[in-house]
Amino acid sequence: MKTRFIVNPRSGRSHRALAAVQAFASARLAEVTVTRRPHHATELARQALADGCQLVVAVGGDGTINEIATVLAGRDAVLGLVPCGSGNGLGRTLGVHGAIERALAILVDGRPRLIDSGLADGRAFFVTAGLGFEAVVSEEFNRHSVRGLPRYLLTAAQTWRAYQPETCTITCDGLRESRRVFTLAVANCDQYGNGARIAPGALPDDGVLDLTAIPPTTWRNGPGLAARLFLGSLNHRTDVLRLRSRRFVVERAKAGLIHVDGELHRTGASVVFEVRPRSLRVMAPAPDEPSLLPVGPAELAAAP
């Protein structure tokens, strides 16, 4: 299988993984390319397909993975993961996380799994997309050269003081409901990354997206919501709206930011989120590995 690695050296621990990736690739006559600027991974992924690569491996965080996966979605080529970012939501969901050596071994011993992807205002996402507080935090977080969970939590705490919730009207499957929300996430995976489970029970291959709308937070309810986020029990809160659908339309008072896998975009007041079922092949651990999380019907797991 012709393979190419695309490494974002500025993403998390990618620069530390580069030597191991280069040694692994050299032993298998695979090529390693390194991104030089924003969105360069997309260009390199297109070139990899043009050169006939059947396995394109993303070495970086969810943003880098998004750039490459956007190119591979709907194609026969398989996406490989060497997660090196601050959250690694897709890798954690599929059981590709931990030591770099394990991620590399999965490229040899694993098998392709066919998963869904989402579109937010026409832009592809594979983990989560959203608006409200999480988009504003992403904007602030992306300004820092130092990443990781501690920095994200500090950025969130600093942003929370000045943030004002907004009213969103959500339409799906005949339902139309308006709520004042702190943040609104539409998820293909159950978590943002780092175990922060914004959509408990969400599966990346069930043919639907999971919407979670968090109510305005205060000093009174904020700690409980944060605890449930990391305990994976937000669905037990009656003030948290949880919906599943193939398509959501979210309307707000004015144009603003959304994020797709942590990358920011400006949209109009109305944002459409929709699923693309069975659209991406990803190399994941073989089903008999205990670290593999169940991700849906057996026929998807067996996809070529």
Image (spheres, helix red, strand yellow):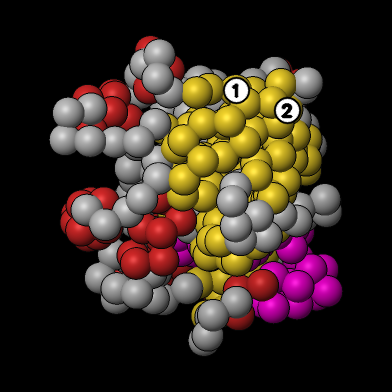
Residue indicated by mark 2 = 172
Q: Nearer the viewer, residue 185 or 79?
A: 185
Three-letter amino acid code of the residue under disc 2: Cys
Kindly state the secondary structure of the residue where label 1 is placed. Answer: strand
Q: Is residue 233 left or right of residue 103?
A: left
Q: Nearer the viewer, residue 210 or 136?
A: 136
Query: Dots 2 and 1: beta carbons under 8 Å?
Result: yes
Q: Is residue 29 left or right of residue 160?
A: right
Q: Nearer the viewer, residue 48 or 249?
A: 249
Residue 203 shows up from this direction: no
Dominant SS of magenta comes to helix
Category of crowding for the residue at label 2, using alpha-carbon neighbours closer than 10 angstroms: few (below 14), some (14–19), many (at least 20): some
Q: Is residue 48 left or right of residue 180?
A: right
Residue indicated by mark 1 = 243
Kindly state the secondary structure of the residue where label 2 is placed. Answer: strand
Residue located at (60% from left, 77% from top): 39
In the picture, which quadrant includes the C terminus?
top right
Q: Which residues are magenta?
A: 43-72
Q: Is residue 297 above or below residue 61?
A: above
How far is mark 2 from mark 1, CA to CA? 9 Å
Residue located at (59% from left, 51% from top): 253
Instruction: Look at the image and say whether residue 61 sits in the magenta stretch.
Output: yes
Residue located at (32% from left, 30% from top): 229
In the picture, which quadrant includes the N terminus?
bottom right
Residue 259: image location, x then y, percent:
53, 57
Q: Is residue 150 above or below residue 171?
A: below
Residue located at (42% from left, 28% from top): 291
Three-letter amino acid code of the residue under disc 1: Leu
Category of crowding for the residue at label 1, using alpha-carbon neighbours closer than 10 angstroms: few (below 14), some (14–19), many (at least 20): some
